[in-house]
Image (cartoon, rainbow, N blue to C red):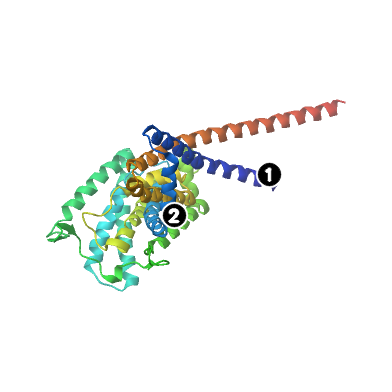
Amino acid sequence: MKKFAKIDKDRLLLGIAAPVLAVVAALVVTALVLLATGKEPFKAFQIMVSYGFKSDSQVFILNEATTYYLAGLAVAIGFRMNLFNIGVDGQYRMGAFFGAVVGGMVTLPSFLEIPLIIVVSMVVAAAWSAIAGFLKVGRGVSEVIATIMLNSIATAVISYLLQPGRLAHLNSNTNSVYTTMLPKSAWFFTMTTNPAAGPIEGFIVIAVLAGVAYWFVLSRTRFGFDLRTVGQSESAAEASGVNVKKMIVTSMIISGALAGLVGMPALLNEAHTYSDEFPTGIGFIGIAVALLGRNHPVGIGIGALLWAFLDRTSNWLEFNGYDKEIVGVIQGVIVLCVVIAYEVVRRYGLGRQQRKVGEELAAAASLKTAQKAEVTA
């Protein structure tokens, strides 16, 4: 039992080492950039920490991280299959748009209205993602190319439908275009622990449940085992009887369904309508968050909180005389350092494992030689 405990401990340390190294390296590089521009790095970090831990900032970070976390989960499903779903951005916008349209057409009790909008969003996003899956298994089209193109098509489809006289209305005062406002029965609940800090959006509960479901399916089910097997080796998966093509399509559908949840905090907790000001680009943030969290639900959560923290503190840095773009530098360097750190840790772990196997083989050979010598004597 001690041996297994030691192995688990070593794996845990290696799993933590990569993101920690990435963040430390990013801070060092950022400090050097600040010094090169004549700014004081430690003061900048102090400003970020002091502002980021204020009560209103904490609420903002939690709300922002909820959306980033869901995007990270959607991307991570593909990553575990060795698939790169770059289309989360288009998928969640398509889902949120049609969810808003359907939700604005009916008025039902909350226990029916809210699930209806969420289900519509997940189904539409899953169907949009499935297109890339079918193109990959049916025509050999790279999912990267397919999902990027589908992002552009999603933008065009929404732009066409989000017009007065079609599925939207024009606000003559602001010249903004929006879908029919959702009834109050479609407004998701909020939690207020400190009135001065603002409400925490209730969709954080759904995000936590999604993370638990992600962990359970991938770690405790046959489907999760098959998914991880295909991601590691398609030929080995096929040899064991796994239908690789079916797994690819299924994984893209699940990834898209999770992407359908990404726009729900903005729709059900904030705007209560889909407009031309609906947030975009969250899908690409999800890629960085999934990388930083190493596709683990807890790690993705930490990555989402870090990203939201950087978003929150960027404006305050600018207010204190620092370039706002410095936070963009931190985020970009973190992503770069994550890739490098993971590769360094992976190679170290592989080399360590090879050395351990070599030591065990050498010990076994030495024992066998000793036993032969005893028999001969």
Question: Does dot 2 land on a helix, a strand or a loop?
Answer: loop
Left-right relation of 294 to 200 = right
Depth check: give the residue in front, 142 or 359: 359
- Mark 1 or 2: in front is 2
Q: Position of residue 81 (x, y in %)?
A: 43, 44
**Residue at image location 47% in from the left, 41% down from the top:** 23
Residue 239 seen by the camera: no
Say whether marks 1 and 2 touch (CB < 8 Å): no
Question: Does dot 1 land on a helix, a strand or a loop?
Answer: helix
The residue type indicated by label 2 comes to Phe
* Dot 2 alpha-carbon crowd within 10 angstroms: few under 14, some 14 to 19, many 20 or more: some
Quick one: which residue is furthest to the bottom in this view?
109
The residue type indicated by label 1 comes to Lys
Quick one: which residue is furthest to the right in this view?
377
Residue 173 seen by the camera: yes
Query: Which disc, if any, is residue 3?
Result: 1
Q: Position of residue 195 (x, y in %)?
A: 38, 67
190 lies above or below 349? below
Q: Position of residue 50 (x, y in %)?
A: 44, 51
Q: Earlier in the sequence, mark 1 or mark 2?
A: 1
Residue bearing the label numbered 2: 53
Q: Position of residue 173 (x, y in %)?
A: 13, 61
Image quadrant in which the C terminus is located: top right
Depth check: give the residue in front, 324 or 294: 324
Distance in Å between CA atoms under marks 1 and 2: 41 Å
**Residue at image location 31% in from the left, 56% down from the top:** 263
The image quadrant that residue 55 belongs to is bottom left
The image quadrant that residue 41 belongs to is top left
Depth check: give the residue in front, 91 or 197: 197
**Residue at image location 84% in from the left, 29% down from the top:** 375
